[in-house]
Image: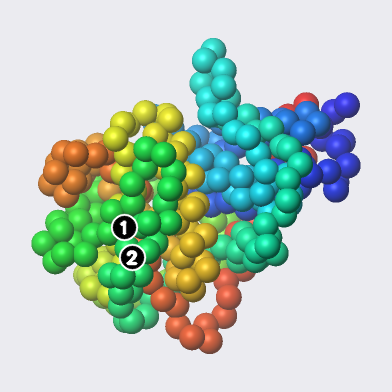
Amino acid sequence: MDPRTAPSGSPARRVVELACGAPSVHNTQPWLWRVDGTRVDLYADRSRQLFVADPAGRNLLVSCGAALHQARVAAQALGTPADVVLLPDPGDPDHLARLELRRGPRPADAVERLATLARRVTDRRRFTSWPVPEERLALLAASVTTPGVRALPLVDTTTRFRVELLVERARDHQLGDARLAAEQRSWVDRGRGEGVPSASIPEPTGHAGAPVGRFTSGAAGPAAPRTGLLEGSDGLLALCTDTDDPRAWLGTGEALSQLWLAATVDGLSVVPLSQVVEVPSTREAMRTEVLGGLAHPQVLVRLGWQEIGRSQLPRTPRRPVDDVLLP
């Protein structure tokens, strides 16, 4: 039977549907799935790779790793926990994971887990000036249990200053790349259940707490002023790995999702800052100057509080499940 005609209520199809709510770079949703009974296979969709910003596919695999983690969470919450094998086919590097669903008890907090998946959004609006306590950052870092990935709170003044300089340098480098700008613009207001709606992109304000964004409203105006790219009250975490290869990138995505869901429960907003890793020179400087050459940086994560009473952002669109299922 064609998996795309599987009953809409089948557990495997529901797992895929929930997994596709995961965050992805530019909301490219660069994944494909194959469902065969209780087996679910995840594949990279290279047709959605950002070949200017992400020629190696790092961000693509981080995105797919986030979807894989959400599939794990969804499967557990639905009472069909998954046994997962990463990169199961040495002959096909785009076959990222195989999940075998099995019957199991639903956890006591199943409803809350599913609700957290539904609430998770990317909110690029300016954070409040309320600081994120170091203790809260430490707890969020400890929530990351993905093998081979560490979440490091960046709290001391010197480290944060170095990181801000590197973020500025990466952003300046990317602002001068016309091909990169065109690639980014192509994913704004794209429609068809993909890309970033301009309504989700804050207007440039020049405020010191303005989020560090790769987009401006409409993606065609001048870049936001460079004053104060990071606010002192922001929480900063670096996701880093011992190796720098596809398995590490996939694991980084799982860790990012794990961290993001924990932050959502805590009421914190999360904005990944991947630019500093996308530019080779700033990625290497991050590795040597910030991490002491002991780990490879994969994603910088910015966390903060939104204003009380601020309206909830609508979720960015998603492709229909049938569009991501392989026959």
Do the numbered discs 2 and 1 sit on residues whose CB atoms are within 8 Å?
yes
Secondary structure found at label 2: helix
Q: How many numbered discs sit on the rendered protein?
A: 2
Q: Quadrant of residue 158?
A: bottom left
Q: Which residue is mark 2?
A: 137
Front: mark 2 or 1: 2
Residue 269 place in picture, x, y as percent: 45, 68
Determine the residue positioned at 51% across, 21% down: 93
Q: Which residue is mark 1?
A: 237
Q: Earlier in the sequence, mark 2 or mark 1?
A: 2
Residue 48 place in picture, x, y as percent: 55, 36
**Position of 51 relative to 125 (above/below):** above
- What's the residue type where badge 1 is placed? Leu
**Position of 106 relative to 211 (above/below):** above
Q: Quadrant of residue 54?
A: top left
Quarter of the picture holding the N terminus = top right
**Position of 164 relative to 136 (above/below):** above
Instruction: Give the farthest residue toward the top.
Output: 91
Direction from residue 15 to residue 152 in the image, left or right: left
- What's the residue type where badge 2 is placed? Leu
Q: Describe the colour scheme in one phrase.
A: rainbow
**Position of 162 relative to 267 (above/below):** above
Q: Is residue 139 visible?
A: yes
Q: Is disc 1 surrounded by few (<14), some (14 to 19) or many (20+) residues within 10 Å? A: many
